[in-house]
Amino acid sequence: MNRLARRFRTLPIRARLSMLVAAAVAFAVAAVSVTCWFIVQGKLYGQLEADLQKVRGPGQNAAQAQVAAAQRILFDCSSTVADSNGLRINYAQVVKTDGSICLDHDSTGVVKVAQSDKDVIKAGNTGTLYFRNGTDKDGNPLRVMTQVFATESGSHVGLITAVPLKSTQDTLKDLALLLLLVSGIGVIGAGAAGLAVARAGLRPVDELTEAVEHVARTEDLSIRIPVEDESDDEIARLSRSFNSMTSSLANSRELQQQLIADAGHELRTPLTSLRTNIELLTRSEETGRPIPPADRKALLASVKAQMTELAALIGDLQELSRSEGQRGERVQMVALQDTVEAALRRARLRGPELTITADVQPWFVRAEPSALERAIVNILDNAVKFSPEGGQVEVTLDCGVLTVRDHGPGIPEDELPHVFDRFWRSPSARALPGSGLGLSIVARTVQQAGGDVTLARANGGGTVATVRLPGAPTAPPEAAG
């Protein structure tokens, strides 16, 4: 059985569906056929039994006629009948308790007395009808009825009557063959229909399989499976999920390729500058021609700046490459006001000549602490970077809305749609240090925390950055505990 089950599981789905449909139909047809056969058999036997009970004389009911017949047979009985010859049409005989038989003079055959007949007669339940299948002395099939009567002497006898059963059995055999034929045709038709239905129903699965094999073979993520808009069955949902998956993978690959290309482009400039400065320093050592102290100091400062820029760029790339699962594991309840205060301390160190004012109210959010702090630091760094010397930066946090306002040159209207793109830098800021990834990291971090961030030109000049994060002014009980 286990071997058959394992072999069944290795078959194709359409073959299994066809076999299951055929098996279900076979079971249903078999149940109906067997039930039909037994119902017909019961009806035919019931008709024969009704015929056996129709032994009537003038002015007599069935019971009176049967009693009269038994008395007449006993009156005419002169000896035990062992055999008889001739055409068997009617069967009627009386059986005594000792097993001897009195044959009706109109009977043309002798019914074989069974032990069950003798037991019924000995039980003495007068008026009881007992039906069975039997044979006569020549083996012809009969439907036999036995009824017990009491004689005048007080003994009991059994009146046995019978009718031929051959035509009824032939009818039942023909019916069985017909039902078997119809069942076979039904099962074969069901199997063919199941196979056709399986092929039609699994055609989208075949298309999906071919699409997956094509993607695995060629890595072509542009393939799509056609799906009817109004269809909402399991296959349609699976096809839509596959199309959505390949679309997401294609977008991810495109973004990855774009990130690699942009990163290569951004790395090329500091690496070229770094290599040039190092070559100058190396050539000076090799040729013995010392570089003037001022120039040497400028070269070393440039090398240090390029190294710092490379380190910042690599850090930003690592931040962008982290998966959603890695971020989700570190999410916790964060006091946003503390994060803003920490970022403000770092911003004041980077812009000591600026006046940075802050009005921070309590607000608690669910986010990754280090990523959230890095995002706020990036926003403040932009404000510090573009503020004029001696300028002012205003920071407020109220009801989950963080605003950072600087008084720098501001961002042109045509550049605002691109400020959160990776590696995008304003043409006016190309000479300033930075990787072009800071605001991209801000947008991603804020979105993962369920909020949104915008940059706009401020009234009176400068730029205002607005971050909205969902949360509460007080810490939840689990965070406080």
Image (cartoon, rainbow, N blue to C red):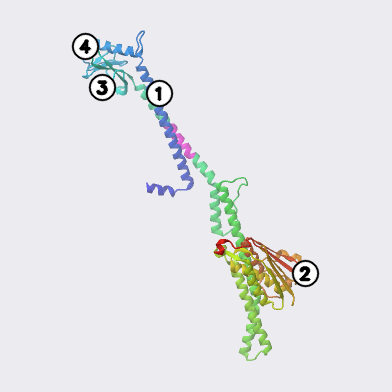
Amino acid type of the residue tagged 4 in the rendering: Ser
- Tell which circle, 1 or 3, labels the residue nearer the N-terminal end: 1
Disc 1 packing (10 Å; few <14; some 14–19; many ≥20): few
Where does label 1 land, which residue? 43
Disc 3 packing (10 Å; few <14; some 14–19; many ≥20): few
Foreground mark, 4 or 3, reads: 3
Outermost residue toward the right in this view: 460
The quadrant in which the C terminus is found is bottom right
Where does label 4 land, which residue? 78
- Tell which circle, 4 or 2, labels the residue nearer the N-terminal end: 4
For the point 42% across and 29% down, the residue is: 36
Estimate the spatial distance between the alpha carbons at disc 1 and disc 2, rounded to whole Å: 103 Å
Residue 461's mark?
A: 2
Where does label 3 land, which residue? 123
Estimate the spatial distance between the alpha carbons at disc 2 and disc 3, rounded to whole Å: 121 Å
Amino acid type of the residue tagged 3 in the rendering: Ala
